[in-house]
Amino acid sequence: MATDTVEDFAPAKINLSLHVTGQRADGYHLLDSLVVFADVGDRITVRADDRLSLQIAGPQAAELPVQDDNLVLRAARVMGMTAAITLDKQLPVASGIGGGSADAAATLRALARLGQKPLPADRDVLALGADVPVCLHGRAVRMQGVGEVLTPVPPLPEAWLVLVNPRVAVATPEVFQGMTYKANAPMPEVPRLPSVTALAAFLHAMRNDMEASALALAPVIGAVRLALRAQPGCLLARMSGSGATCFGVFGDGPTARTAAREITAAYPGWWVAPARMLS
Ligand code: C5P
């Protein structure tokens, strides 16, 4: 029986490292990033319909008015399909963990299944946004170019993350503009990392080159990093993407959940999510 409703998960995207290595003539920045995903995210449901529509529900829905240029609707137009689409918005918007790009990628996957159609050409996926190709890939990967060059990495060890967003939206273009130096060294090859401590040691040798600029725009990011670093068992705390979400790396689920509870108790206004790292 043909199904007329398809659901897909849009996991948070985390830049474990993010080196900015240059800038193209068109203004886009060249990146070198180790990207993973987390088992928290948005959910997309698509139902066959003769017109295209979008409803947004979920705890972060109020942050995201339904507008014609929503990435979910743009993704549906790239697929050339009409459907009634529901977005269950769990991730904070404009927060450096992929949100809109993850939603666009999940919409492409769901509509491809619904319509039994192929995914769009790579250039059309990239045109939706620089992070959409990596979100469509959906597994741990090294991301280069402006986001379109994806190279497999050896399997990563089991790890847990605590994601913390201070509920300050940060605009990606402004963070790029605020960077004073844009020709940083690329990241090293990702070796086989047998344990979470080996992963953390490897990450300590890298950076997020956008952190200083984001911190100047949203100084609370410094407090978020400190709150994570203060938690027992936090092996590394860093900002993801252009912020303001920061992540802590932990070795097991209970320790991550305890850290998340502590941070929520101390900062009730922040969005805090413990998650398993999907690699
Ligand atoms: O591609 P996307 O729409 O997600 O990017 C948002 C903005 O971030 C771009 O308009 C550009 O200003 C900036 N950007 C960049 N270099 C990248 C990705 C994004 O300069 N690699």
Image: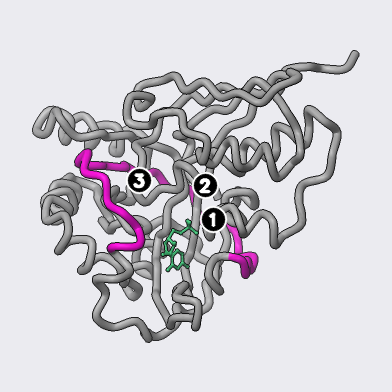
Marks 2/3 in contact by CB < 8 Å: the verdict is no
Q: Is mark 2 within 8 Å of ligand 1?
A: yes
Classify 10 Å Cα crowding around label 3: few (below 14), some (14-19), many (20 and above): many
Instruction: Confirm whether the magenta stretch covers residue 224.
Output: no
Residue 121, x across and y down, in percent = 76, 56
Residue 28, x across and y down, in percent = 47, 72
- Answer with left or right where residue 73 lies relative to residue 265: right
> What residue sits right under mark 3 in the picture?
94
**Residue 146 numbered tag:** none
Marks 1/2 in contact by CB < 8 Å: the verdict is yes
> What residue sits right under mark 1 in the picture?
129
Quadrant containing ligand 1: bottom left
- Residue found at the far right of this picture: 1
Q: Is mark 1 within 8 Å of ligand 1?
A: yes
Question: Is residue 191 visible in the rendered structure shown here?
Answer: no
Question: Is residue 49 visible in the rendered structure shown here?
Answer: yes
Q: Secondary structure at mark 3?
A: loop
Q: Give the magenta range.
A: 148-174
Q: CA distance from mark 2 to mark 3?
A: 10 Å
> What residue sits right under mark 2 in the picture?
101
Q: Earlier in the sequence, mark 1 or mark 2?
A: 2
